[in-house]
Amino acid sequence: MTPYTIMTEFWEASFQDKQTMWGFEPADSAVNTMELFYKNKIKEILLPGFGYGRNAQIFKDNGIEVTGIEISNTAINLAKKHYGDSVKVHHGSVTDMPFDQTKYDGVFCYALIHLLNTEERKKLINDCFSHLHSGGLMVFIAISTNTPSFGTGTVISKNRYLTPHGVKLYYYDSMSVEEEFGHYGLEGAKEINEPAKNKGNKPSQVCWQIICRKK
């Protein structure tokens, strides 16, 4: 099977089995990004890895038009049940971007880029940057080498592991953040806890919040 087929089947199975598994409460980093976008008067954004739209509502509630990209048709159908036609979602893999020639004020890419290999990550960053208007912002949330799960599973390459759940994860450190985002208007990068506080007996993940601006 091709990597696209494997990824499609993995996410189809996940969404068919668990449906709206994270609910519709936005991730803490989505709330923080909304505040950043609001301050910068951003009105139209792209969400690669849209899922069923968990993180879309907070942007919509603040008057931002949202377009998504999602590989799972099941997830898109779940989103349609919740949002109707108020959100446009392209069906396909982010590795096949672009799906349109639209320029956006912002891009929010949550917990997606670390699922990709080196070339796919480079392409995603470049494609997202190309979708921005001048002055636009893109925010990536990516898992850190300082998260508790780092080092578990089978080593694929430096900082990349096949987890016991069958997911390939690339863990970012400060050097790889600079290497991959440094040429794309990198304004800041800091480690955050996601969620900000532990919920129940599930520990927070340590992630990078990476902010780039197109000049």
Image (cartoon, helix red, strand yellow):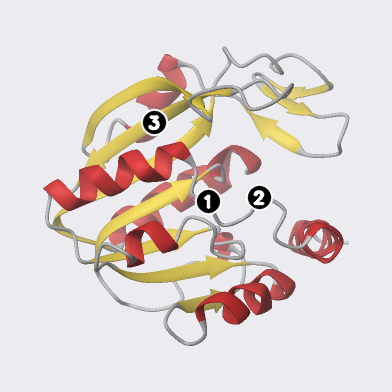
Q: Disc 3 or disc 1, which is closer to the eye? A: 1
Kindly identify which numbered label has been placed on residue 22.
2
Does 126 sit above or below residue 51? above
Counting from the top left corner in percent of width and height, residue 56 is at 44, 62
Instruction: Kindly state the secondary structure of the residue where label 2 is placed.
Output: loop
Q: Mark 2, residues whose alpha carbon is within 10 Å: few (<14), some, or many (≥20)?
A: few
Of residues 6 and 158, the one drawn nearer to the viewer in this rendering:
6
Question: Which image quadrant for residue 163?
Answer: top right
Q: Give the spatial CA distance, label 3 vs label 1.
A: 19 Å
The residues tagged by marks 1 and 2 sit, at their Cα atoms, a distance apart of 8 Å
Task: Identify which residue is drawn at 47% across, 51% down.
Answer: 123
Which x, y percent locates residue 192? Answer: 43, 22
Which residue is depicted at the point 60% across and 22% down? 198
Three-letter code for the amino acid on which mark 2 is drawn: Trp
Q: Do labels 3 and 2 touch, CB within 8 Å? A: no
Q: Earlier in the sequence, mark 3 or mark 1?
A: 1
Q: Which residue is mark 1?
A: 25
**Residue 2 at x, y percent in the picture:** 81, 61
Give the camera-side residue of 98 and 52.
52
Residue 140 higher or lower than 144, as above or below: below
- Is mark 1 in CB contact (under 8 Å) with mark 2? yes
Q: Are marks 3 and 1 in contact (CB under 8 Å)?
A: no
Which residue sits at x=57%, y=12%?
Answer: 146
Q: Tell me the mark number nearer the camera, choosing from 3 and 2.
A: 2
| Nearest the eye: 55 or 145 | 55
Q: Which residue is mark 3?
A: 209
Mark found first going from the N terminus, 3 or 2: 2
Q: Give the residue type at disc 1.
A: Glu
Quick one: SS at disc 1? Answer: loop
What's the amino acid at mark 3? Gln
Left/right of residue 59 with respect to residue 10 in the rendered view? left
Please state the horizontal and vertical placement of residue 147, each as a whole percent of the image: 61, 16
